[in-house]
Image (cartoon, rainbow, N blue to C red):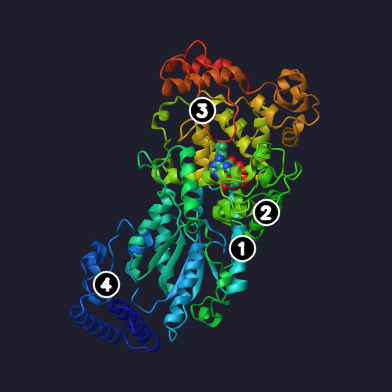
Amino acid sequence: MFKNHASANKLFNRFTITRLFQSTRYPFFLSRLIIFTIRSLLKVYNKLYPLNVLVMSPHKANQPTDRSKKRSQSPPSSPKRRKISQNDSMADAVTKPSNGKNNMLVWFRSDLRTKDNPALAHALQKAQDQHESEPGRRKALVIALFVLSPSEFRSHDVGAVKVDFILRNLATLSEILWESYRIPLLVKTSSSAADVIKDMHQLCNAYSVSDLFANQEYEIDESRRDAKLIKSLPNDHVEFHLHQDQCVVPPGVLKSKSSNLTYTVYSPFKRMWFDVVKKSKDKYLTLARPLSDFPSPMNSVADLESLSIAHPDAIPDVLKGFELEAEKKKHLEELWPAGEVNALQNLDKFCSGAGKHESPGITAYNDARNYPNLENGTSRLSPYLAVGALTTKQCIVKAMEANGGKLDTGSSGIVTWIQELIWRDFYRNVLVGFPRVCMSKPFKLETMNIQWLFEDDVFQSWCYGKTGYPIVDAGMRQLQKTGWMHNRVRMIVASFLTKHLLHNWQHGEKFFANSLIDGDFASNNGGWQWVASTGTDAQPYFRIFNPYTQSEKFDPDGVYIKRWVPELAGLKTSAAIHNPHSVLSAKELVKLGYREKPIVDHKVARERAIAAFKLVLGKGGPVPKPKSNQGYGNHDYEEKETKGGAPKTKALESYFKDKIKSEN
Ligand SMILES: Cc1cc2nc3c(=O)[nH]c(=O)nc-3n(C[C@H](O)[C@H](O)[C@H](O)COP(=O)(O)OP(=O)(O)OC[C@H]3O[C@@H](n4cnc5c(N)ncnc54)[C@H](O)[C@@H]3O)c2cc1C
């Protein structure tokens, strides 16, 4: 009847004991006695049939840890563990629960969707499998959970704009889960990571949870939190299943051919990525099973009520400390409608774009992506990816459909778009390979010696788009108004802060994280470190964006500038729009309401930056000529050598002080 003794043993154990618990109301000591007797019988059985290593008998690979050793003095309830082997996923490192609990809890984090959600799909699958294999048992309930942690939002620089988007996405997620499947989404508030762990134990006990499902988050704090949970949950007889959803190829899989280490350069990573994914399409590009594959409703409302869950929790409209002005909130709701339905619709629209200049879409992406004035030159899907209303995999599958099933050949626009998505995998790979980037350290440690300046008024002028450089100001104001900024302009403003203003990239990173609706640690940190020449595969320090030429090239008619810097909307000539100080007098500019002088002089600022970076990164000789354009979009750098060498470190600040800061 059974394939092997182990499964017979396992089934007997789970079925018999749990049925006894459920169907009777024996006093506590009686149930303990029964368990003890059954366990003793099983021990004898295991001895007779040594193949049975699974259920209750101690085994070398199942030695309890210190914490569970204490508990093992009361044998009937001591949890069993398998040691973690190299090939195990983190989730496999815990034992099966052996009591009456059988509900599934799905902990949503950065994955606010029902489609292509491996954690959710596996929870449903497990509930269904259990039901089929143990038909007499009460059907497992599937419960969803989101933990709101204002202190974690604060410590991770998640700003009000993204918090608002998370809440709105939660509301749509809750609606889909409940209306179609009677899966209630519970929303709990925790004040710290330590509390999250404590709360999770309480919740698992309160809702008789045997299995907790989640998709993995790779940042260091989140990884540590999960590791602690994995260690502690078996004490409550709860299995923690962690799945992968953020990357197409999970971090750690792709290693440099020559060194077998984490890739630190994008281009070879990308080549390997294409090779591996093409070879194993089924493995990497198959979407998780949709909810529609499972019976609906998933839960019986009466069973839910027995757990005192009559309905999903209300999703707060606003979180204390993360309020937005009513007008801004309304504007953001219109601009970024929440939920996976909208995310998928936008993906569809982008991928079926006709390729015309007015509505470019994916096939025109190669050309259109660099022009910030084009509304649909890029997909604008990053906010949905950041909260997990959409996955990279869904995007790539859709893009391949539009490309006749091809991944790295066919439409150049589509291939380029796929390559941009691969940056997400790349930066997550870096994060896992070099966790120091999560701990306020640059990838290139020597860049900690760069003598950054910090002047609050200068920084504030950058933050709020008052630098006197129209393209920089336009970008920062777009960010303030919409929570989003075009990639080309992100590079320009980031370069301006770190090179022209010689401010530490970490200030910019923090400000972006707090202001962006698509704030994503890996991409934000990667983007900033790339621009600041402190990161993996970073642009060489002597390549400095010229904001004037960038502006002329990518916003030739000044449409983008005029939209976001209305003071300049009336300017007629190209020269005036891109560099108003070269054409208009200080008086005329003041009359328009724009800065009298730019915050720094371009030429002087550029020299100062090269000098400061050269002291740390240069070899002291002439600045080398770059070999080629290195990957990150098609940039136009200034590649001139610095003349006259760099001033010495100590003198650096004063050397440039007067020249650099013309006015505030
Ligand atoms: C200084 C700086 C900070 C950044 N901060 C973030 C951030 O916090 N969150 C974020 O999602 N992106 C960030 N990026 C990357 C990029 O600017 C945005 O992903 C992109 O502008 C989003 O617009 P889109 O959805 O229209 O992108 P598309 O051009 O349509 O690209 C599709 C998707 O590919 C991914 N992608 C594209 N370019 C990159 C890239 N360079 N790095 C990583 N992923 C990329 C994004 O998920 C994007 O949604 C940053 C870039 C820089 C230079």
Amino acid tagged 2: Asn
Mark 4 highlights which residue?
78
**Can you tell me whether the CB of the residue at mark 1 lies under 8 Å from the nearest atom of ligand 1?**
no
Sequence-wise, which precedes: disc 3 or disc 1?
Answer: 1
- Density class for disc 3 (Cα within 10 Å; few <14, some 14-19, many ≥20) is few
Element under disc 4: loop
In the rendered view of the protein, which quadrant contains the C terminus? top right
State the residue at coordinates (52%, 36%).
528
Specify the label residue 171 is tagged with: 1
Sequence-wise, which precedes: disc 2 or disc 3?
Answer: 2
Q: Is residue 311 above or below residue 217?
A: below
C-alpha separation, residue under disc 2 versus residue under disc 3: 41 Å
Sequence-wise, which precedes: disc 3 or disc 4?
Answer: 4
Element under disc 3: loop
Mark 2 highlights which residue?
346
Q: In this rendering, which labeled residue sits more in front, label 3 or label 1?
A: 1
Mark 3 highlights which residue?
454
Q: Pointers 2 and 4 in contact (CB under 8 A)?
A: no
Q: Pointers 3 and 4 in contact (CB under 8 A)?
A: no
Front residue of 473/558: it is 558
Q: In this rendering, which labeled residue sits more in front, label 2 or label 1?
A: 2
C-alpha separation, residue under disc 2 versus residue under disc 1: 19 Å
Q: Residue furthest top?
A: 644
C-alpha separation, residue under disc 3 versus residue under disc 1: 41 Å
What is the x, y in percent for residue 158?
A: 54, 48
Amino acid tagged 4: Ser
